[in-house]
Image: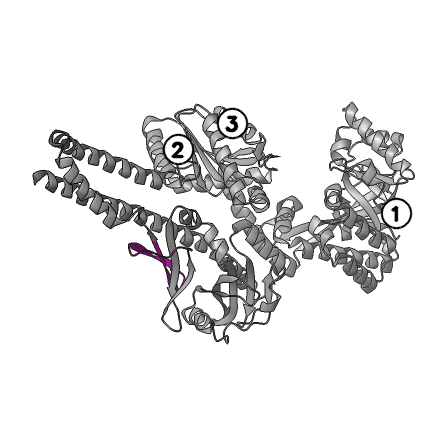
Amino acid sequence: MIIVAIGAYWTHVSKSLFDNEQRLLMNDIVGAEASAIERRLSRSLSTTYILAQEIKRNNGIFENFESYAEEVISTIGGVSNLQLAPSGIIRQIYPLGGNEKAIGHNILNDDDRRREAQLAVAEKRLTLAGPFELLQGGVAVIGRNPVFLNQGGVEEFWGFASALIYLDDLLDVTELRNLERRGYSYQLSRLHPDSGSVNVFARSQQALSGNSLSVAVNVPNSQWTLTMSRNPPGSIISRTFWGYLASLLVACVLVYLLYSVLQHPLKLQREITEKTQILDDMLSYDNLTGLPNRHLLSKILANTIAESEHYYTQAAFLFFDLDDFKRINDSMGHDAGDHLLKQIAERLRDAVREEDVVARLGGDEFGMLLQNVESETQVATIADEVLAVMEEPVKIESREYTISTSIGIVMIPSDGSQVPTLFQNADMAMYAAKKEGKRTFCFYNEEMQASVLQQLRIEEELQGALDNHQFSLNYQPLVDLVDDCVCGYEALIRWYHPERGMIYPDSFIPVAEETGKIVDIGYWVIRETCEFIKLRKLRGEVSVRIAVNLSTKQFNDPNLVSFITQVLEDTGVEPRLLGIEITETILMKDVGDAIMKLDQLKGKGITVSIDDFGTGYSSLAQLKRLPVDTLKIDRSFVMDMDSDWSDRMIVEGVIAMAHKLLLRVVAEGIESEKHLALLKKYGCDVGQGYLFGKPVPADDICPSHTVQSRAQG
């Protein structure tokens, strides 16, 4: 009877252990998946706050919505489209393709969704609507952020800034489908806002079992419930029966049974220890690659910071992601992407020392903690090795892919004494590396923080500068090198800030390019230049061509040709007096489209020049196809021409080649008589540089059509 009692107790303990183990494991898994959904929703819905801020900043007017929305979606990710609904009526969607049916839809009056929309307006906060089937097809959730504008001290409802997230895309950031293949069941549900009944909107193919666990998923102005279960292998009744039967059989062999019973508590203890370790690993390690995850890395970083400050040692943290990883995921599928991440993880583990830590932080982001480093030089050497390792070809399904990365580096503890600060500073350094052209690394410095703040400040002030007429044009003369006469000017923009004085183009043009403001600024330059040409004619001054520079976004704007045509008609300026200058980089992005647009401009009589020639990637085969009139040799070749033999050969060769193609040549950056003499010797047609004159305002241009003396210059 004692032996049977022990056997029964063993069966009961085993069943309880299994149940508790499954409960603990299920609790961690459900919590992790609920957190993944909340994080993705929070990040994706932040796009509505960005749109709302832009609407408020522009007092309800949103220009260039498509380009702005495209940049927001590509930066943050996880969003299928962004919508603007002034007064609750959807007016703009990006991307529009496939979503045309939603245009004109009145959110506040729709029977199925109006309660959630009205709740958002009443509470003045973001509300998540859905999931529900869309007019254009598919099941999605929509975050509606009500926008209120301050009108005379009163907040008035402007409309909604909305972000649409397909349910399938949201579930893709979780491990639910992988867990389903491992025998787990799940369902996502909510209380329907109208009926109050439970609405299940996502579930696994296999139904939930009785032993399930539910966790609340907090979403804006609502609450979802994630419920999961796992059917245990075999039958509990069968296992219990065989447990008692085994006890009776074991009772027949007293000595063996006694030995087994004495050993069993130790076995149970080992199992508990092993299962506890497994649970700890699941919380601290990435399931796909086996690397430490962000949670564990944060703990290690905190310890490293404390040790570095106490023992006066140095460490370094490298933060990087995979360039263009989304391209492989989209073209080859997530399985191929997972295979790639595993290979990268193995390479990184082999590339560092035993005491260093490599972690996967999520998605395609990785972190690397280098312990006890001596200097930045040592860290730079390791970073170079990481870049080289990452660029080794990766074989996926018999095809080879080359992956690159950009690395941001922070030194510990000098660049931060808190873990969040280290992540933030490393992210800024990585962004700086990407701006330098990717495939490189950057160390964090305080100038990066200042640069980010300065860029945000300039971005905020750009629109005001255009509206308040803070921009002006300076003109630099172009001189015919045969008869030493001014044959034209180049219009160069300047920004005279009321508080900070003159801001040079290098400080604000890149920001204008990123925000899309460059298109409006560029059109202002064209109109202002034509007005100046008109003014010179009215004064009776000699008519010469004035050239303006076109940015990439402006050249690609479909309204460019029609705008220039309209401005020429409005001002009565002859097209031959207006020139445009474009860089090689613009032309090489889409040669066919560039040729078509240049043909349209030249057909109207406008002169076309290739600016900064020699710094881009154009070939002779492409150059002879381009309908251009002039090549401008970049000043980098001209400045050292008197002392650098290779620069002289390049300049002479470009001039000879251009003349063979019946093109005129302009040399930029002429600053000395030696430069001038060499260029005349090589047969250059036109010169530009400080030797002839600096860019000056329109009122300072000498009406004479001849070049002043060098001394006066």
What's the residue type where badge 3 is placed? Ala
Looking at the image, do the residues carrying marks 2 and 1 touch, with CB atoms under 8 Å apart? no
Q: Find residue 143 and report its horizontal and vertical position in percent.
A: 47, 62
Q: Is residue 215 magenta?
A: yes
Alpha-carbon neighbours of circle 1 within 10 Å: few (<14), some, or many (≥20)?
A: some
Q: Is residue 551 left or right of residue 679?
A: left
Q: Is residue 112 magenta?
A: no
Alpha-carbon neighbours of circle 2 within 10 Å: few (<14), some, or many (≥20)?
A: many
Boundaries of the magenta span: 206-228
Q: Determine which residue is flagged by label 3.
A: 380
First along the sequence among labels 2 and 3: 3
- Looking at the image, which residue is at 86% across and 37% down? 658
The quadrant in which the N terminus is found is: top left
Which label belongs to residue 413? 2
The quadrant in which the C terminus is found is: top right
Count of picture labels: 3
What's the residue type where badge 2 is placed? Pro
First along the sequence among labels 1 and 3: 3
Q: Secondary structure at mark 1?
A: loop
In depth, the one of 347 and 384 nearer the eye is: 347
Query: Taking 150 as reference, is 82 above or below it?
Result: above
Mark in the foreground, 2 or 3: 3
First along the sequence among labels 2 and 1: 2
Q: Find residue 201 and report its horizontal and vertical position in percent.
A: 43, 62
Cα separation between marks 2 and 3: 17 Å
Query: Taking 316 as reference, is 68 above or below it?
Result: below
Q: Is residue 550 left or right of residue 194?
A: right
Instruction: State how the image is colored.
Output: one colour
Q: Secondary structure at mark 3?
A: helix
In depth, the one of 453 and 357 nearer the eye is: 357
Q: Determine which residue is flagged by label 1.
A: 705
Q: Find residue 193 and report its horizontal and vertical position in percent.
A: 39, 70
